[in-house]
Image (cartoon, grey):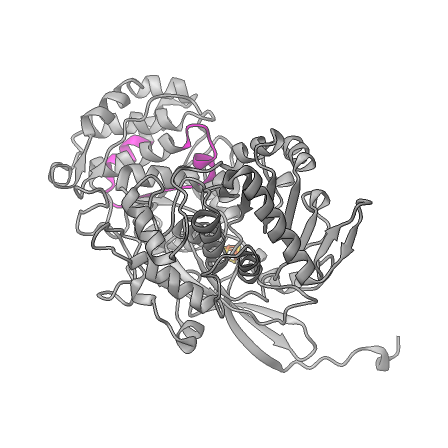
């Protein structure tokens, strides 16, 4: 090669944008610089409180993901001969809107569904949920976050009265004991793990216990690894609850002032027997079980962080509550360096929960089954209808499609043929479905092979909006690349279809307007039906404010515009009586 064949690359950065990594629930801040030659340089954002400039190997490689290889760049509709043909946006949007409208007219609103994703930005998620529940009138919208997070949501609601994560990442660094349950943090939340490694280096007396059937990379950092028999976590934590009670570790003042239901939980715990019985059930060495119990009992500052190994289980919700019970008994919650801590998998699993993007939730932490909540949401949305009962959850949804009860499904930013547990069933279901629509950035996926309509969406680097990470921190994801081909934002596609279906209320001029409505809804009539999820302090942002706002932890109310680092500091919970609930967790293996 001659020297003259080598392209001249300018090393001078042209623009740098502060945005957020799209890979995991840690939610690291990223600085993306588009160089003059079009290459994208990635660096950790030192100003972002979640990662303080660090990035893991996945985040560091983001610059290599922004090329257009395999991208879906134009709307496509499958013709009579089965081949996909490029069509205009008008044609594609009409096909979707007319198809959904016809099926709703002929078979009712429960005959259509949306299946969405924790990869969506909050603004996209908000519009999808609004369309389905407030305008089509069905709660048939579920998400791939169902698979990873719904147990944590249900566990939080049972214990705290609302889906609330008490603490923050700093609590893991401040703790003297960190218990990691069903969490390969080293691989799945790498930057949080690095923070933990640094904290333990600085304070070697800090203890880490890993509870996982497998010996993962995370276990290398642990002082104690309990290779618990799969599905027996409830035994282990019920056993711990009984042990703590017997050892006099109950915080009587906290129990009286802030909790209810201890006796039932203790009775259920006693069913698991003494530590010897627990060790046998969990297939653990009794000395290891006792070492864990003694350490937990002796340490005031304990964080118990749990993840998919706890959540993805037929008894996942009880596992979550068996963990929370131990923190409630000891009053180790709502203070620095302690508390139960759910680690979310996807970058915006938490944002999806905020907008109610699950089939059994409403919006802004309100309940489908609560008439006052339905009235509040309908009042703000000014919507013609309101779903009043839970819709189909992920697995049930695809069963209903196969049975012909759901006749149209719109899949957005996910690939259920690959990611749901029974790929063959999902493939069979989609093959039978009258209308399968897929919004995606990639043209060829297993799900798209079954779709009748493909809608090109924006990818990371092109999208504008917000995400919320595991510690309730809302961050901006900012576009730094132009939309390729004819790709459009998910919120825009959803609004375009909504208007074509004849619905008012979808005339947003951009994600800022959607976020403002989301923030307003969180505070709407909050005096009548109090919700801790309140970001009313962020409502009404102008363009400058939305473009520049710094990461902030909700709640964000008028009294605390800088957000809230830690919940429950006043010992008050979201149940109507202000008390947290112990939940009796039976010893069912799951
Ligand atoms: S830890 Fe998660 S959010 Fe942070 S850089 Fe790695 S993949 Fe991205």
Residue 506 can be seen in this image: yes
Q: Position of residue 103 (x, y in %)?
A: 59, 42
Find the residue positioned furthest to the right.
1
Q: Position of residue 97 (x, y in %)?
A: 60, 53
Q: Determine if the magenta segment contains residue 318.
A: no
Q: Determine if the magenta segment contains residue 303.
A: yes
Give the left or right position of residue 404, taking residue 257 as reference: right
Give the left or right position of residue 309, taking residue 207 as reference: right
Q: Is residue 167 above or below residue 180?
A: below
Give the left or right position of residue 489, taking residue 365 as reference: right
At a point 41% along the width and 28% down the height, the residue shown is: 315
* Closer to the camera in the image, 41 or 264: 264
Find the residue positioned furthest to the front.
106
Quadrant in which the N terminus is drawn = bottom right
Q: Is residue 364 above or below residue 221?
A: below
Q: Is residue 58 above or below residue 251?
A: below
At a point 54% along the width and 35% down the height, the residue shown is: 397
Quadrant for residue 43, please give it. bottom right
**Which region is colored magenta?**
292-316
């Amino acid at each position: 090669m001659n020297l003259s064949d080598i392209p001249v690359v300018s090393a001078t950065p042209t623009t740098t944008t502060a945005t957020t990594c799209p890979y995991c629930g840690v939610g690291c801040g990223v600085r993306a610089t588009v160089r003059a030659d079009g290459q994208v340089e990635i660096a950790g954002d030192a100003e972002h409180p979640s990662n303080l400039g660090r990035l893991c190997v996945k985040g560091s490689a983001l610059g290599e993901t922004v090329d257009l290889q395999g991208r879906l760049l134009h709307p496509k509709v499958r013709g009579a001969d089965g081949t996909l043909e490029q069509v205009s946006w008008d044609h594609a949007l009409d096909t979707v809107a007319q198809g959904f409208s016809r099926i709703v007219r002929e078979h009712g609103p429960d005959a259509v569904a949306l299946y969405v994703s924790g990869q969506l930005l909050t603004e996209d998620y908000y519009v999808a949920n609004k369309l389905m529940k407030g305008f089509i009138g069905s709660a048939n919208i579920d998400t791939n976050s169902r698979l990873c997070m719904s147990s944590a949501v249900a566990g939080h609601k049972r214990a705290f009265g609302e889906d609330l994560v008490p603490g923050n990442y700093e609590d893991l660094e401040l703790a003297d004991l960190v218990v990691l349950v069903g969490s390969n943090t080293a691989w799945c939340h790498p930057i949080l793990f690095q923070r933990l490694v640094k904290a333990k280096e600085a304070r070697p007396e800090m203890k880490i216990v890993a509870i996982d059937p497998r010996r993962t990379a995370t276990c290398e950092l642990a002082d104690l690894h309990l290779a618990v028999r799969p599905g027996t976590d409830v035994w282990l934590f019920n056993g711990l609850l009984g042990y703590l009670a017997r050892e006099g570790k109950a915080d009587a003042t906290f129990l009286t002032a802030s909790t209810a239901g201890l006796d039932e939980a203790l009775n259920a715990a006693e069913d698991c027997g003494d530590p010897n019985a627990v060790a046998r059930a969990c297939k653990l060495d009794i000395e290891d079980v006792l070492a864990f119990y003694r350490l937990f009992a002796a340490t005031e500052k304990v964080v118990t962080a749990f993840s998919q190994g706890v959540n993805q289980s037929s008894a996942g919700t009880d596992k979550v509550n068996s963990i929370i019970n131990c923190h409630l008994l000891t009053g180790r919650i709502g203070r620095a360096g302690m508390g139960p801590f759910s680690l979310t998998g996807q970058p915006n699993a938490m944002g999806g929960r905020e907008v109610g993007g699950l089939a059994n939730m409403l919006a802004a932490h309100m309940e489908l089954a609560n008439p006052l909540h339905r009235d509040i949401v309908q009042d703000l949305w000014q919507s013609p209808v309101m779903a009043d009962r839970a819709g189909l959850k992920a697995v049930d949804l695809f069963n209903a499609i196969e049975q012909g009860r759901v006749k149209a499904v719109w899949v957005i930013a996910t690939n259920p043929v690959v990611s749901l547990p029974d790929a063959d069933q999902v493939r069979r279901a989609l093959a039978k479905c009258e209308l399968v629509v897929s919004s995606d950035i990639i043209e060829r996926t297993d799900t798209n092979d079954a779709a009748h309509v493909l809608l090109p969406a924006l990818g990371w680097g092109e999208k504008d909006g917000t995400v919320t990470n595991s510690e309730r921190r809302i961050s901006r994801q900012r576009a730094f690349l132009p939309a390729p081909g004819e790709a459009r934002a998910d919120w825009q596609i959803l609004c375009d279809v909504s208007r074509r279906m004849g619905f008012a209320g979808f005339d947003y001029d951009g994600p800022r307007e959607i976020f403002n409505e989301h923030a307003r809804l969180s505070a709407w009539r909050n005096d009548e039906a109090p919700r801790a999820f309140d970001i009313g302090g962020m409502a009404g942002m102008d363009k400058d404010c939305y473009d520049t706002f710094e990461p902030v932890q909700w709640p964000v109310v008028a009294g605390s515009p800088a957000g809230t680092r830690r919940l429950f500091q006043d010992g008050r919970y979201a149940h109507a009586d202000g008390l947290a609930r112990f939940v009796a967790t039976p010893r069912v293996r799951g």
